Every structure is written in C-alpha cells, then in structure tokens.
Amino acid sequence: MAASSSETLLSEASSSKNFPCFPPLNRFNHNVVVTWLLVVVEGIGDNIWTGTVLASYLYELMGKSNAYAGYVEAAQGLSNLIVALPVGWAADRGSKAKIIACGGVLVPLAVAASSFAVIYGTSHIEENILCFWIFLGAMCMWGIVNAVSSGPAQALYADSVQTGERSRYYTILFSLYLLSSMLGPLVSIIMFVLHGNHWRLPDLRNIFLAGLGFELVSMVFFFGYKDGCSLEIASQHTAADAPGSEPVESDDGKLAQPKEAEGTTTSAGATQIWMIPYILFASSLCFALGSGMTVKFFPLFFKNSCHLSPVGVQSIYLAVPVLMAAMSGVGTKISSRFGRAHTMVAVKVVGVSLLVGMAILADHWFGESALHDRDHSAVVTLKAFVVVAIYLLRTGLMNCSYPLEESILMDFVPPSTRARWKALDSIGTFGWCGSAALGGYLADQKGYAFTFFITAGIQGIATLLQAVLVFIVPRSEKPAPNVTSTHDEPTTQPLQATRGHDRHDEPILQPLQANQGHGLMTRAVRVEDSLNGGAASNGDASATDVVTEAIAANRPQVMAVDVPAGAVPGQTVVVILPDGTKLLMKLPRNAVPGGRVDITLPLNP
C-alpha cells in the first residue's frame, strides 16, 4: 500500500514537470524535450558547416594544406578544455539552467565572427591569414558553447530521466543527433547541386552561412531549461547509489574514493564500482586522441585521394547517421541480453579491425605507388566504393555504443557530480582537437593512410581499457526486483516509513530487516571487544542474548543484515534488532541491494 502510494505521488510529481504543450511531447519531461529540440536544431547547423564544408573551405583558402583545418579544431578544443571544468563545477554548485543560458548568449557572437571570416575570406583571398585568425577566435567561442551544451545541458537531461530508463532515453537522444547529422548533409547536397557541385569558395561560403543560420535558431533552446523540472527524487535512486560503492565528495569538493568504514559487503565487484567513471573517462580520452587525427580529414581523403565530388562526399555523411541510428538500436537490444559493457567492447574490436583494413587499402590503392591507376576512372571508382563501404560500417560500429556509454556513466556517478563528469568530456574534446592539429601535419607529410594506422593503434589501446568494464558493470541495467531473501525468513515485518514516526523527521525509503532465529543470527552477529581485540563467542546463545550481553558490556556490535532490493545505499533506514528494537541508521555506501552487509551498532541503541 505504502509503495503504491509512493509510486503514485512520484508519478504525479513527474507529470507536473512535463513539457507544457504539443502532444505527444507533453508526455515527456520539460528538460528532456528541450534537449531533444536543441540537439536537432544545433545538430543540423553543425553538420552543415563544421564537417566537410569547414575543412574544405580552409583547405582551399589556405593554399591546399590540411594543417589549418587541424589548427582551428585545436583552438576549439583548447577553449572547451579551459572553461568546461569551471562550468561543470558551477553547474553542480548552483543552477544548471542559468549556466546553460550563459552559453546561449555566446551563440550570436560566434555566428557573427564566423560569418564575417567566411564572407571576407571569399572576397579577399589575399587576406587569408587575417581570416584564419578570425576563424580561430570564432572557434574558441564555439568551444565554450559546446562545453555548455555537452556538460550542464547533458547533466540536466540525465537528472530529468528515471533510473533504469537512461539507455532508452540516450538511444532516443542519439537517434535525434543522428537525424540532425543526416539532415545537415542533405541540405548541403541540395545547395551543392544548385551551385554546380564544385569545390569553389563561393559555393562553400553559401553553405557555410546556411549552417550558421541554424546555429542562430538553436540559441532559443539554451534559454529553455528549468532546474525545477529535474526529477530530484528519482535521481537519488541511481545505480550509482544502488549497485555498490560510489565516489564521495570531500570537503574541498574533490572526488574521493568510496568510504568503507561504515560497512563491508561480500558482493563480488562492489568495491570496484567506483572505478567505472574513471575507466570510461580514460578510454574515451584515448578514443578521442585517436579519432581526432583522422575524423576531420576523412572528407579531405574522399575529396583529394578518392576524387569524389561535393555531392559524393556529402552523400557519405548522409548515409553515416542512418547506419549509426540502426546500429545503435540494435546495440541497445543486444546489450539487454549480453550486457552493456560486453556489447561496447565487441563493437569496438570489430570497428578498429575495419579501420586497419581501410588503412591498408588506402595505402595500396591511393598511395603514391598507385598514381598510375588514376587514369582508369572505372577502377578508381570501384576502389573508392569499397573503401567507402568499409568506412561506413566502421563508423557505424564505433559510434553505436554511445547510448550505452552515456547510460553507464550517468548510472554510476551521483547526481551532485554529473555536470563535472560531463565537463571532463572537454579533455577528450581537446585531445580530439589537439590530435587533429598533429593529424593535419602528418597527412601533409606522410599521407592519409599513415594517420589511419596511428588512429587504429590508439583506439586499440582504448578498447583494452574499456574491456575492464566487462568485469565490473552488472549485465542487467534494471534495478534488482524486490524479492524475499533466500535466507531464513524474517519474523519481523518491514516497518512502514511515515513522517514523524518514532521520532524520525524524514521518511525512510526502505527499512533493513535483521534476520533472527538461533540458526542464522547466531552466526551472523559478531561481537568484537574494542578494549582487548577479543571476540565474544557466538556459541549456542540466541541472537537476542548475544546483542543484549554486548550492550551491557558496553562493547560495539557488528551485525549482518539483508539489504532489500529496493534499498538505496547512503540513505537513512531503520534496522530492526532481534529483540524488536528499532534503530535509525545510515545504510553503508558500499551496500549492494539484494545482498548482505555488516553494520556496526551503537553502544546504546
């Protein structure tokens, strides 16, 4: 009855935080819908101008050099790195919605600087150095905007989604991102067809400006977030709290390792759960370092080595999101059976292998030794088709695990530090952009195939790091169901938590029950002498007698109790002693729902 009432109240509270209009969007949380709209509009703009168009424009403007495209990426990543961590810290300490709105203020400034650089550069190509420096400044502003949209905005999105549903909601978010990734190239294809399908600066300029127009519209959604629409109650019941140990915050605000003084647990892997976000961060940083060397230059590889037209290159990037969307849905379904970590590692292994194959073919077919084949257009076209097919499959596999990675991260970090963990993505972004500068230089000096090999090696290391999660992350994402313990059946019924009951000022989420009876509790209760280090004998005395004797002797008692499946580590609960005494205690942070944990009782319960 109490559980049903609690679920009803939670449902009513959640519905009051839904998007206010436009069915069926009004069935979803307000912040969730705003994030979806931002991802679509901003994504369309980004995918019109930041990919093929930006790299090709700078390549043509700066005298056919790959390096300058890498330099502007590095500038964006550096600004992202500088501001993202302070922004994440401020969002965790204050209002996420206000921080996101501050990012929206920068959007029109970044649009103005980018527009001036591309317009002036097209009409005054002799001033290409000046335009390049303006591009650098504009990209720094875009780096700040991206730090906000990928940090506090994503953290507020996670706070607004129920626990156990994040993989599904991140799959939706990822699909919308891919939809925008498809619509962006589609707009570019239409404009290239209208302008003659050539890599000319005036044609690239017009498409560039169209993308910036979408960026200007996206500014509206930066001001649409509401802190009050986050699911505060639900976000406290995260798997970060439930499956095992969680990182805790020290007085100076830094993340520390989980405390184990309050209790110990015998569940396998519980003490390693705190490592999950750190492993994800380290692996994502390696993936970013590897990807940055090549991702920005794939369009130039298709343009310069495979000799594809603008429409041909953009058609590739029209197909990529379709394939990624299909694979992300399949990946989520597979993970429900085999586990999220297992699925992530499997697809990464195949993806890295495909990149190695692509690098071998690129060197053999399009390297310096293959120049003589370029007179045979049919042969070159067939080879380009094979390379493109490998690229599409590899890209789809490498990116389809994004919903799984995000859901694991948000499930295993506490709500109070989510914005900071998302802000750490900025280091990965800088790694991406910093390696882009190196990748541009290597592409000019060694060729594209050489950078592909380097990327495959770095991403192979990242995959090995991510493989550690297979041994830590539970296979099932859903919280364990509420089932009766398989131990001796408790004789005391769960205490129904009510406000003001037994001098408790706060409602209790879930009581603990201490099993009693001579068999189990005599073995479960362990009494240690704090003065001489000795231990009281459990013998054949009843559990009640053992506890009573320890209290009379003014000695601390350690009791083993069953943790209900719905309990939340770190929350205040009621422990029912064998003699019926009820104690208000804090459930240890490393307790595992459905398992058992040792708790130290006070001297005078």
Image: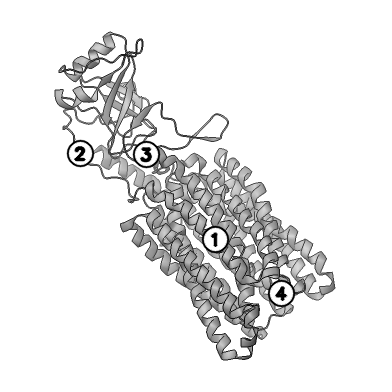
Which numbered disc, 2 or 4, marks the residue that appears first in the sequence? 4
Of badges 1 and 4, the one in the foreground is 1
Q: Which residue is mark 3?
A: 270
Amino acid at circle 1? Gly
Q: Residue at x 60, y 46 (%)?
A: 98
Q: Which residue is mark 1?
A: 457
The image quarter in which residue 524 lies:
top left
Q: Which residue is mark 2?
A: 484
* Residue neighbourhood size for the residue with mark 4, other residues' Cα within 10 Å, grouped as few (<14), some (14–19), many (≥20): many
Estimate the x, y position of residue 395 in percent, counting from the top left: 50, 68
Label 1: which secondary element: helix
| Image vertical order of residue 510 relative to residue 12, above or below | above
Of badges 4 and 3, the one in the foreground is 3
Is residue 187 something that shows in the picture? no
Label 3: which secondary element: helix
Amino acid at circle 4? Arg
Q: Nearer the viewer, residue 338 or 39?
A: 338
